[in-house]
């Protein structure tokens, strides 16, 4: 009887020990790290190096790079992909923006007029700049060519000719411009003429960036603003060979386009759109109220590309 009981006890202990060992093996296996293949390690490293939302953090600022010293009253550099300000100085200050206004004029023209319409140049249009005349009285050009003259050469004659053509078609171009500005959220802006000659009109660096972002949805306009020179022939066979007012088109690497502006009240203004090489990204630089608009812009673009890592 005793032998029988001892045998039973031994069997129970053996079974219990086997079960315990199996459970221990499963427990240990569950908490062991997975075998780290090369791809697992790479993914872990990538997750550590890059934030969850790359667009929110890239580009990353290197604070060891000193800020540039510029002359402008207001300035801004904006990164398209991350929707971030890379540089900001007085970006909400209301200032006259001179011929940067013509960017909005061009957008209003494209959205409200037929680009193939024929415009006959009036005496009012050619006298807007006094003795400085780009067009001829009675000369006939299509709307698209006037837009080119306005954006490349910054022709005030062309801007006023477009305004008069719109009026002849019962379209108040200045009203359309202000409505468009409001639609884009340009709440620190008000426009009084299509050329930007009236210094009582105003905008801000932040609002100009909003305008340029919308411009980028019109590849045709950006293409025009990238041209260093072009030729236009009127329907009267008058040829106009025009040069850009923006010398940085031939100097800054990877520049996609830009627009200049100047009046005595506004001083120098400049917009430049630059591609970030091999990063599928763009930055927008805006300078307002500067005596050194080209130097300021060059400094800001170079600083942005040195101080930020994509």
Image (cartoon, rainbow, N blue to C red):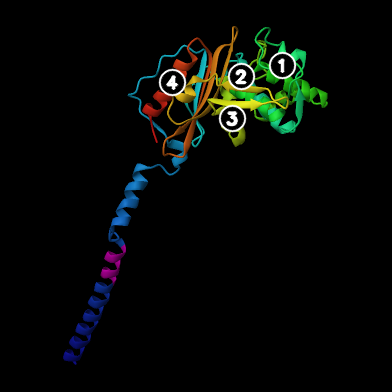
Q: Which residue is mark 2?
A: 154
The answer to which image quadrant residue 28 occupies is bottom left
Q: CA distance from mark 1 to mark 2?
A: 16 Å
Residue 298's mark? Answer: 4
Q: Main secondary structure of the magenta part?
A: helix
- Residue 194 in sight in this render: no
Name the N-terminal-most of marks 1 and 2: 1
Mark 4 burial class by Cα count in 10 Å: few <14, some 14-19, many 20+: some
Percent coordinates x, y for residue 91 in the rendering: 54, 19
Residue 243 covered by magenta stretch? no
- Residue 290 in sight in this render: yes
Name the N-terminal-most of marks 4 and 3: 3
Callout 2–callout 3 Cβ contact below 8 Å? no
Which range is magenta?
23-30
Q: Is residue 100 left or right of residue 44?
A: right
Residue 224's mark? Answer: 3
Q: Which residue is mark 1?
A: 136
Percent coordinates x, y for residue 77 in the rendering: 49, 25
Percent coordinates x, y for residue 2 in the rendering: 17, 89
């Amino acid at each position: 009887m005793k032998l029988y009981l001892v045998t039973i006890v031994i069997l129970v202990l053996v079974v219990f020990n086997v079960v315990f060992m199996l459970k221990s093996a499963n427990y240990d296996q569950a908490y062991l790290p997975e075998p780290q293949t090369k791809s697992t390690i790479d993914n872990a490293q990538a997750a550590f190096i890059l934030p969850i939302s790359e667009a929110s953090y890239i580009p990353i600022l290197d604070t060891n790079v000193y800020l540039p010293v510029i002359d402008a009253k207001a300035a801004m550099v904006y990164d398209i992909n991350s929707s971030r300000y890379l540089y900001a100085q007085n970006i909400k200050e209301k200032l006259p923006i001179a011929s940067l206004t013509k960017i909005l004029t061009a957008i209003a023209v494209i959205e409200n007029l037929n680009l193939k319409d024929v415009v006959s140049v009036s005496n009012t249009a050619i006298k807007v700049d006094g003795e400085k005349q780009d067009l001829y009285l009675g000369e006939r050009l299509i709307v698209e060519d006037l837009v080119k003259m306005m954006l490349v050469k910054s022709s005030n004659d062309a801007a006023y000719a477009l305004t008069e053509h719109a009026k002849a078609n019962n379209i108040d171009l200045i009203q359309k411009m202000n409505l468009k500005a409001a639609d884009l959220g340009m709440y620190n802006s008000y426009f009084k003429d299509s050329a930007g000659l009236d210094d009582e009109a105003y905008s801000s660096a932040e609002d100009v960036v909003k305008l340029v972002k919308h411009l980028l949805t019109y590849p045709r306009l950006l293409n025009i603003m990238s041209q260093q020179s072009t030729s236009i022939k009127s329907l009267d066979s008058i040829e106009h060979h025009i040069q850009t007012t923006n010398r940085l088109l031939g100097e800054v690497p990877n520049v996609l386009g830009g627009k200049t502006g100047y009046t005595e009240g506004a001083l120098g203004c400049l917009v430049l759109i630059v591609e970030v090489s091999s990063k599928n990204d763009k930055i927008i630089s805006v300078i307002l109220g500067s005596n050194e608009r080209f130097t300021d812009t060059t400094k800001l673009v170079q600083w942005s590309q040195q101080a930020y890592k994509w």
